[in-house]
Image (spheres, helix red, strand yellow):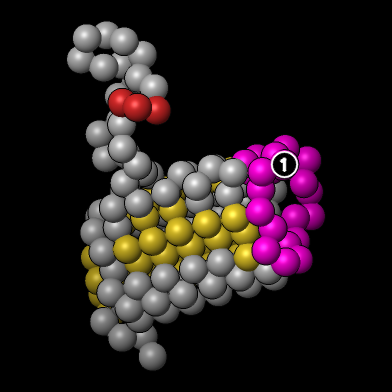
Amino acid sequence: MIASDVQFLGDVSIPHPELVNLYGCAIGAGTRIGTFVEIQKGASIGANCKISSHTFICEGVTIEHGVFIGHNVTFINDPEPRAVTPDGRVMGDADWTVVPVRVCAGASIGSGSVIMAGVTIGAGALVGAGSVVTRDIPDNAVAYGNPARVKTKNRN
C-alpha cells in the first residue's frame, strides 16, 4: 500500500507497488524500492538510492542520496522498546521519543544488517552483510560484524 501522504520528489521506481508499505515518508528522484519494503512516516530517502526487498525503514531515519540498502535491512529508532508504561498502560506516541538514524551520501549497507537507534553511517562507508551497527561509522570506512567494527578507515 502506498498512502496518499507519501512525497515522491521525482520519478521513483516501485516495480510492485501492491507489495510495499509506504506512508508519510519522502522519497527522492531516481530511487528504486524493492518488494516487501516498509518506509514509515517521518523517514526520508534521498535521490538515486536502491532499497532492496524486505527492508524496514522506521520513523526518524534519514537516508541521503546515492545510498545502497541490501535485502532485509532493519533500522531501529528506539533503544529501549517497551509495550507498556511502568504503570501497565499500553504505550502510545507520547510515551517514547524517536532516536534518529542517518545514512550519509554514497554509503552501502549489506543484506541482513541491523542499524541501531542514534547512529550515523558516514558518507561512502560500507557496512558488511549481517552486521549490527551499534555506533557511528566514519566516512569511507569499511565496518562489519556483531557489533560492527571498523576494519578499514578509508576505502578510497
Between residue 64 and residue 8, name the one nearer to us: 8
Image quarter where the C terminus lies is bottom left
Callout 1: few (<14), some (14-19), or many (20+) C-alpha neighbours within 10 Å? Answer: few
Occupied quadrant, residue 82: top left
Which residue does the numbered mark 1 point to in the structure image?
4
- The picture places residue 78, in percent across and down from the top left corner, at 32, 39
Q: Note whether 84 is above or below 73 in the view shown.
A: above
Q: Is residue 65 magenta?
A: no
The magenta region covers 1-23
Residue 22 seen: yes
Residue 144 seen: no
For the point 69% across and 58% down, the residue is 8
Between residue 103 and residue 100, name the one nearer to us: 100
For the point 70% across and 39% down, the residue is 3
Q: Please tell me whether the stretch drawn in magenta is mainly helix, strand or loop.
A: loop
Occupied quadrant, residue 91: top left
Q: Note whether 11 is above or below 114 in the view shown.
A: below
Occupied quadrant, residue 96: top left
Residue at far top of view: 88
- The picture places residue 13, in percent across and down from the top left corner, at 75, 61
Residue at far left of view: 86
Q: Secondary structure at mark 1?
A: loop
For the point 50% across and 51% down, the residue is 43
